[in-house]
Amino acid sequence: MKKTIIKGTGRALAPRLVTNEDLAKIMDTTDEWIQQRTGIQQRYWVPEEGQMGASDLGLTASHKALEKAGWQPEEIDFIIFATLSPDIFFPGSGCLLAEKLGLTSTPALDIRQQCTGFLYGLATADSYIKSGLANKILVVGGEVHSSGLDKTTRGRDVAVLFGDGAAAVCVEGVKTDENIGVLASCLHADGRGADNLMTELPASRLPDRHPQGLPIDSERFFPSMNGPAVFKTAVRKLPQVTRETLEKAGVSLDDIDMVFPHQANLRINQAFAQFMKIDEARMFNNIQKYGNTTAASIPLALDEALEQGVVGKPGDTILFVGFGAGLTWGGVAYRF
């Protein structure tokens, strides 16, 4: 039977380190205020000058993943690019990444599932591989948030959360009877909570995507979030999808060597771990260093954990789990 195996990973961070103290210089906030509410100490943003998009960061991450996998770009059967911050309105960043990799006919798919984008991407790759439609797939999560944030006191609740970055994973179909690779995936969405976390404008549903007379610094052009509602829903849905994914995979929580939650807010992850009675040593959190990199956060954490030797040994079983805008949530169980 064909199994979906991770062959290589890579990550890329934007070059500009932005600390909480740096943010305190441009908005009414403090390092203490940010850390108490989010756990974040710093994040990386793209330069204020020049052009650097999600596909540029994705390219750097992809080259690293390809090298570890031992692949050449022309061996890629399919590209899946998860992002909420595409380089341009259209076409998608997957096509732009393919061009930068020197590819001229490789199919590319963009996934706009925000914080659960990588989970949706990995599950899609697994389905493509098991159906025989592709065998070597490059899954990328890449974000440039900083150019779309309200970096004033008005927007601080959201602006302090986000960082720019990308991570790539090379997945390949391998015929084996071993119970390895992607063991199970579970995905969900509930659009009734869409307005709890969104950027409204520009909006094609309006007669004018950029309403005339609206100032360019209107709140409607920036991300908005109902923090309490998102927090409460996340700490309810994450345990549910964890149990669902583990049951589908035929493993118990005790079998999981490391949990990789989406890095949205350290307080959410801590509440989730406490509710599920998961020891801190089995929860991989790095939001303190990178902020919320949305679709990049889980694969970025995986690449860092592999680099540190925290996971990756034969038999290691891990769980990816996330919740975000949409509202969407999901989980993927994987065994090395």
Image (cartoon, grey):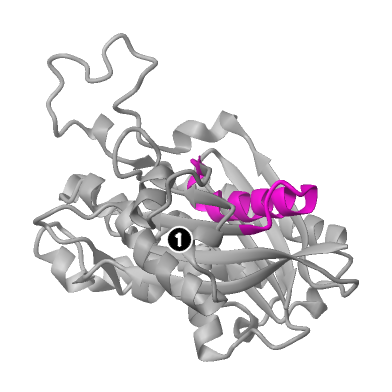
Let me know if residue 165 appears in the view: no
Residue 125 among magenta residues? yes
Q: Main SS type for the magenta part?
A: helix
Camera-nearest residue between 182 and 219:
182
Is 322 above or below relative to 176? above
- Along the viewing direction, whichever of 167 and 224 lies nearer the viewer: 167
**Which quadrant, please, contains the N terminus?**
bottom right
Q: Quadrant of the C terminus?
A: bottom right
Under circle 1, the secondary element is: helix
Residue 6 x %, y %: 64, 70
**Badge count:** 1
What residue did someone put label 1 on?
296
Residue placed most toward the observer, 68 or 57: 68
| Residue at figure coordinates x 52%, y 73% from the top left | 9
- On screen, 2 above or below 17? above
Rendered image quadrant of residue 174: bottom right
Q: Is residue 24 magenta?
A: no
Amino acid type indicated by mark 1 = Ala
Which residue is located at x 49 percent, y 41 percent? 112
Find residue 256 and report its horizontal and vertical position in percent: 75, 77
Against 126, residue 10 (above or below) is below
**At 54% across and 76% down in the image, what residue appears?**
70
Magenta stretch? 109-136
Q: Position of residue 254 (x, y in %)?
A: 81, 79
